[in-house]
Image (spheres, rainbow, N blue to C red):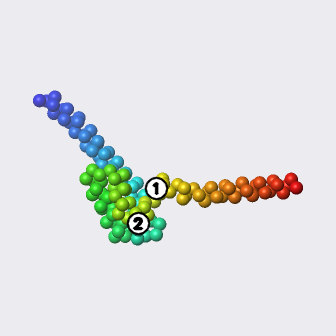
Amino acid sequence: MKMSKSIYKLIIPFLIIHISVISFAGVNELSDYYKTIRCLVCEGQSIQESDTEFAINLKEQIQKKYSSGISIEEINQELIKIYGEEISFNPPKNHILLWGTPLIVLIIIFIFIRNKIRFFKRV
């Protein structure tokens, strides 16, 4: 009997610490996720930074879904389905060509100008 009480005295603090760490990790993960979601009311702000009613309601909805066991990725897909891709600050991978085209054009122009300069130096 005495042995079991001392075991409980050892186990309970570890359980409390473990639960605290898990809940803190969840809050930290949500806080990081809020920074990737655009506030559609504010120009260029995330819902983490915004104090608008839209941002507050969206954070509450995300918190409820996350607390019920839905993963961040599933929440993100649902938000994109509802609000479109403009809700996310992280562009989808299928837009790499769209984002990479200006860089490719600049490289081609640089190569073209370099070749023209070399040609005129020879003449």
Q: Is residue 36 above or below residue 14?
A: below
Left or right: 105 in relation to 89: right
Q: Residues within 10 Å of mark 1 (few under 14, many from 20)?
A: few
Amino acid type at mark 2: Cys
User: Residue visible at 71% across and 56% down?
Assistant: 110
Amino acid type at mark 1: Pro
Cα–Cα gap, marks 1 and 2: 18 Å
Q: Secondary structure at mark 2?
A: loop
Measuring from the top left, give residue 56's x and y in whole percent. 33, 66
Measuring from the top left, give residue 42's x and y in whole percent. 43, 70
Left or right: 77 in relation to 16: right
Quadrant of the image occupied by residue 123: bottom right
Q: Can residue 115 be seen here?
A: yes
Measuring from the top left, give residue 104's x and y in whole percent. 62, 55
Residue 14: assigned label:
none
Q: Look at mark 2 in the image and give the residue it sits on.
A: 39
| Mark 1 vs 2, N-terminal side | 2
Count of residue discs: 2
User: Residue visible at 32% across and 58% down?
Assistant: 62
Task: Using the image as rendered, state which of residue 64 and residue 8 is in the foreground.
Answer: 64
Q: Is residue 81 above or below residue 29?
A: below
